[in-house]
Image: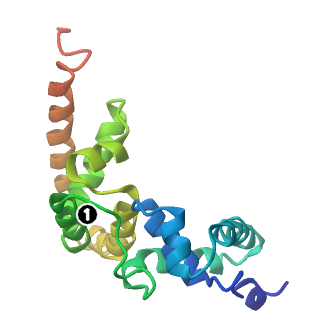
Amino acid sequence: MSENSLLEPIHGITLEDYSAACAKIGSGLSEADVAKALGVEVPVWQEANLLWPERMKQDSTFHIVTLFGQYFGAADKHPKFSNLKPAASTEGSGNVEKIKADKDFYQELEVARQVAYEYGLDGAQWILDKYGIPLGDFQIAASLWSDQIHQDIQANYQGYNQRQDAYRAKYQQLFADAQGGNVADDIEF
């Protein structure tokens, strides 16, 4: 199978369709919602959902995976999904838009999510519970900000690290307070 044939649609579902569908499922849409938007039955979607990853494995150039990431990040612009959103609170919807438009907000929540994991919490679930941002939308924001963040790091590595450290300290304190302090807080040397 040549690379071009690896990009052929599966049951009419293009790689762009598949990538956007994955992003939207990660943002809370059901498989039924996705299948309907794609104009196929759920079993057809499910088969495409099994076959696209298999094609990615066959692609030794990683071209399909690269395109998947680009299309995943642009899911909100996909014509079949642009107006299709899961039910969310007004605050959650506002935060979903904010994380995609405000790089500092994204970076702060990326650190908060990681610190939550360090404190034994499901960081993605904490972000969903606290801010109403599903993992799929969080990952879309990550792909949107990736290049800019890499440029920021190259331009001012020290400043980037200082901001990250400040976010880390803020959330370590927040999670420690929520747990009644850190394990070693009462140890004196």
Please tell me in which quadrant of the rendered image residue 80 appears.
Answer: bottom left
Residue toward you, 148 or 8: 8
Horizontal and vertical percent for residue 30? 48, 61
In the image, what residue occupies the spot 26% across and 15% down? 183
Q: Which residue is mark 1?
A: 157
The structure residue drawn at horizontal position 62% and vertical position 68%, both measured from the top left corner, is 42
Secondary structure category for the residue under label 1? helix
Please tell me which residue lies in front, 158 or 88. 88
Residue 134, relative to residue 59: is it above or below?
Answer: above
Percent x, y for residue 107?
24, 59
Its colouring scheme is rainbow
Q: Is residue 72 above or below residue 111?
A: below
Q: Position of residue 147 (x, y in %)?
A: 36, 76
Q: Quadrant of the N terminus?
A: bottom right
Look at the image and tell me whether residue 39 can be seen. yes
Q: Image check: 73 left or right of 69?
A: left
**Residue 44 lies in what quarter of the image?**
bottom right
Q: What kind of residue is marked 1?
A: Tyr
Around disc 1, counting alpha carbons within 10 Å, would you say few (fewer than 14), some (14 to 19), or many (20 or more)?
Answer: few
Residue 85 is left or right of residue 174, and the answer is right
Residue lying at the far bottom in this picture: please name it. 4
